[in-house]
Amino acid sequence: MPNAKMFKALNEQITFEYYSSYMYLSMSAFFADLGLPGCSHWMRLQADEELLHAHKFFDFLLNRGEKVILQGIETPPNTWKDALDAFQATLKHEQLVTSRINALVELAFTSKDYASHTFLQWFISEQVEEESTVTNIISQLKLIKGDGHGLLLIDRDLGLRQAGTTTDTPA
Ligand code: FEO
């Protein structure tokens, strides 16, 4: 039988997804200020995507007849050393998200809450994709070793990201 601990954890994940969105929105502003509109665009779409994640948890709880209790959102950082530093912070954050999703899956399993377990499978796949995409961007940023021309090319590519995708280059 689903338990209170499971629903509390799912509620907390709503807030965490909102924090993720807030952090990427902050990065979007940082990149705009830096004169990298493509990176800013990529982060803006990332922020939008995190809101969709939050709303998936929101809708799931409501569909289960559970109470949604929204909590305060922590203030995100507002500056990073450079583009590489910001994307490394993104990867670190996504790895934290992955560990949280894994903990939720474990809790669903031990609670025998099979509906939550099934619901969370989408997030497992999503995290593999998110970590992979950001790892590729970091590799490209490392390859150019701070070269301005290379950075502008990466920025141009990231500016081609379309809503609903996490890919760093167009399909
Ligand atoms: Fe909601 Fe980027 O994971």
Image (cartoon, grey):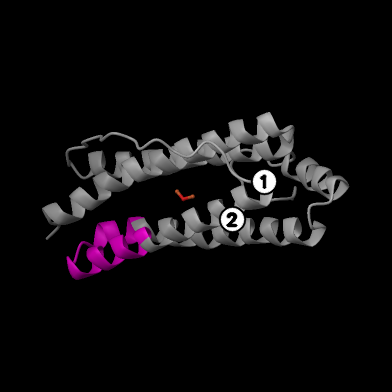
The answer to whether 126 is drawn above or below residue 44 in the figure is: below
Q: Is residue 35 left or right of residue 67?
A: right
Query: Quarter-wise, where is residue 91 in the image?
Result: bottom right
Magenta-highlighted residues: 100-119
Residue farthest front in this picture: 81
The answer to whether 87 is drawn above or below residue 143 in the figure is: above
The quarter of the image holding the N terminus is: bottom left
Q: Is residue 140 left or right of residue 110?
A: right
Residue 159: image tag: none
Residue at x-position 59% and y-position 55%: 88
Q: Write down the residue under mark 2.
A: 88
Residue farthest right in this picture: 149
Please check the rendered image and state whether residue 110 is part of the magenta-colored stretch, yes or no.
Answer: yes
- Given residues 133 and 153, the one toward you in this image is 153
Q: Amino acid at mark 1?
A: Asp
Please check the rendered image and state whether residue 94 is part of the magenta-colored stretch, yes or no.
Answer: no
- Given residues 123 and 119, the one toward you in this image is 123
* Residue 48 position in % (x across, y down): 52, 35
Q: Amino acid at mark 2?
A: Gln
- Given residues 170 and 115, the one toward you in this image is 170
Residue at x-position 72% and y-position 44%: 158
Residue 82: image tag: 1
Q: Nearer the viewer, mark 2 or mark 1?
A: 1
The answer to whether 113 is drawn above or below residue 55 in the figure is: below
Return the disc, 2 or 1, that comes first in the chain's sequence: 1
